[in-house]
Amino acid sequence: MKLFRFICSDFGLFLISFVLLALAGIGIETMLVPHFFPQLDDGAGLMINSDADTYHHFAMQVLDDMRTRGLAGWQLSPHGAAISGLIALLYYVTVPSPLVWVVVSAAFCGLAVMTLLRIGMLCGVARQWMWPAALSLICFPSAMLWFTQLGKDGIYVLGLYLIIASWIELILTPSHAAVRPWVSWVSGAAGMACLLLARPYMLMILAAGFAVVGICWTLLQCFRSPDRRHLLRQLLTIAVWIVALFIASHAFKGNFNSWDSVQKYMTESAPLPPSKIDRWLPGMQKYTTSLVRYRLRFLDLYPHANNNIDPQSIRSADDLLPYLPRAIAVACCQPLPFGDNGMLPGASQTIFSRLMQLETLIICSGLLCTAWAGARGKVPTAVLVTVLALTAFVLLPAVYIGPNLGTLHRARYGLLIMLASIGWGHVIQACLGSRRTIESA
């Protein structure tokens, strides 16, 4: 009984996640890649030509400058990759081995699992039934690979979870017994810092999403809340939250070199054909044109990537709205091991694609469980709608901008696992909780 209580505790869940990922990362980099996949080994236990290999290369360049010039040679974001600056600093104070980052990444992922447990509890699942669902974050093969190689996925998922959990606590469930406002504010700020380091453009998307959700929530509460003082306090919280996100997102343009290459492509690329949307809604032309050009830029950079999906579907702004139903299906349910997944012929036969298909099928089952829990009223409606809206704000631009299933799976994984784990937690609670009630009776 004491062991079960320890496992269900925040520290116990963190320790299990940390140890599991640290051991898996050491095994992958010292045994699996060098001995079983030597053709993929870059010499440091990382997969050659992968993001991890690139980050390690950038970090070693910065480390060489630091050895010559000291801390004056350190850069936060060499070549636009902030994670490489952190890795270089870690190499400088310890040893220049990717295994050092494995331990740090395992700690970030352990904190992400803890935060997912917190979100599940806010969604009506008891702690003792939510912890196995929360552990699903690190149990899928692709996630195990991302989280144990050099990368920013652990920081990115942690940042998303901290921001979403803080919003739920401060805005939607301020009277929840477990909510401590100062902890929510600090964790929200920490989430913004994580996203600024990992995927800073996501702050802009989240800021827009929170603005829309906040406005809708405000209009609803104006008609429902009799306590005007409480409503005013909540409105002030929403305003501060959204302003903080916009300020943090503005730092992206000034501090990351990758923005310059994006802007250069946007100005030098050929003009798009005229569209009806631009004529009907001239104020939207800047945004629709940018969306299409981002997508075309991705396809220009990676024209022969195996997991590219629907590469010819969008060529002008007029194609954006008709593609929306397909974009929703791609965001949530692709690739599945059956039906047309939109990939190039032969792409679905690789081992990584087959794993992605299996993972998508399992995650879809969790999404169905969440829909069941929502329909039965087990999840607070405001919380569920907010999480779904934010998920849509993050995933739909990702589908439009990066038409590649591998890239999309990486961007959506944390959000879809969050939704699925809420459903799995409610199913576990309904099955095991009712059995315990019957046995005690």
Image (cartoon, grey):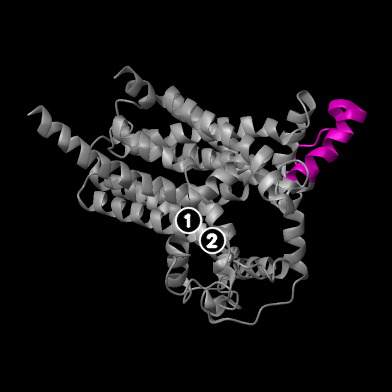
Residue shown at the point (52%, 48%) measured from the top left: 141
Does residue 223 appear to the left or right of 102 in the view shown?
Answer: left
Q: Residues within 10 Å of mark 2 (few under 14, many from 20)?
A: some
Q: Is residue 62 above or below residue 339?
A: above
Q: Which mark is residue 393?
A: 1
Q: Does the stretch in magenta take in 64? A: yes
Q: Which residue is mark 2?
A: 397
Asked if the residue under mark 2 is in contact with the one under mark 1, i.e. CB atoms within 8 Å, the reply is yes
Three-letter amino acid code of the residue under disc 1 = Phe
Name which quarter of the figure residue 23 lies in.
Answer: top right
Three-letter amino acid code of the residue under disc 2 = Pro
Q: Residues within 10 Å of mark 1 (few under 14, many from 20)?
A: some
- Nearer to the camera, 251 or 327: 327
Q: Does the stretch in magenta take in 300? A: no
Q: Quadrant of the C terminus?
A: top left
Does residue 384 appear to the left or right of 18 in the view shown?
Answer: left
Name which quarter of the figure residue 22 lies in.
Answer: top right
Q: Which residues are magenta?
A: 55-78
Residue shown at the point (54%, 68%) measured from the top left: 348
Residue 113, x across and y down, in percent: 46, 35
Residue shown at the point (16%, 32%) measured from the top left: 436
Q: Is residue 187 above or below residue 420?
A: above
Identify the element where label 2 is drawn: helix
Residue 396, x across and y down, in percent: 49, 61
- Nearer to the camera, 137 or 217: 137
Identify the element where label 1 is drawn: helix
Q: Is residue 16 visible?
A: yes
Q: Residue furthest left?
A: 441
Residue 53, x across and y down, in percent: 74, 47
